[in-house]
Amino acid sequence: MDAVYRLTNAILGDEADARDAAQEAFVAIWRQLPRLREPERFEAWLQRVAVNAARMTIRSRSRRRVREIPSSTVVARAERAAGAPPDDAAILDAALAALPVDQRAILVLHHLEGRPVAELAVILEIPEGTAKSRLFTARRALADAIEQDRGHRR
């Protein structure tokens, strides 16, 4: 449960949405478990279901009328208003939030969960070369988002 929550929270950046996505992932796993063909790949399958649940949560976010603002965003804005320099975690959170969910997912799986590229390919159901390419693109997008955020804070 903790690993699924950590994954959905890292992708979504919102605790309530992460809990909802983790719960949806476990409901989907419970329903689909009898159809699991390769039990030895359970962990990769579990993570794929969690990533898909996070994607669905992001899609439902865009349909919401009320926009939730993560507490880290409020704190970062308050620090900026007070003239305090933002910490690296706030910059990283803002940069990750600016990325599309697929890029966040691949970065979280690789860098936070420690999954090698071959596992990324299995989890995301893409060829290994595509996983490498998407990881490279996501890293570049993250670096650009960090640089853009730092430029706005100066």
Image (cartoon, grey):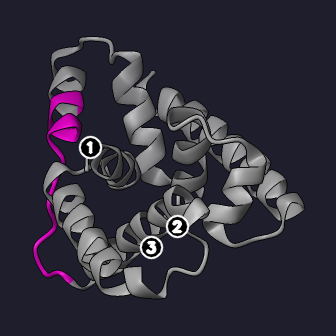
Say if the magenta span includes residue 31. no
Q: Nearer the viewer, mark 3 or mark 2?
A: 2
Identify the residue under disc 3.
52
Q: Earlier in the sequence, mark 1 or mark 3?
A: 1
What is the x, y in percent for residue 127? 83, 68
Q: For this rendering, which residue is in front, 49 or 83?
A: 49
Amino acid type for the residue under numbered disc 1: Asp
Identify the residue under disc 1.
2
Q: Nearer the viewer, mark 1 or mark 3?
A: 1
Q: For this rendering, which residue is in front, 55 or 80?
A: 55
What residue is at 24 percent from the left and 85 percent from the top? 63
Return the residue found at the far right.
Answer: 129
Q: For residue 93, which quarter of the picture? A: top left
Q: For residue 134, which quarter of the picture? A: bottom right
Identify the residue under disc 2.
45
Q: Earlier in the sequence, mark 3 or mark 2?
A: 2
Q: Earlier in the sequence, mark 1 or mark 2?
A: 1
Q: SS for tag 2?
A: helix
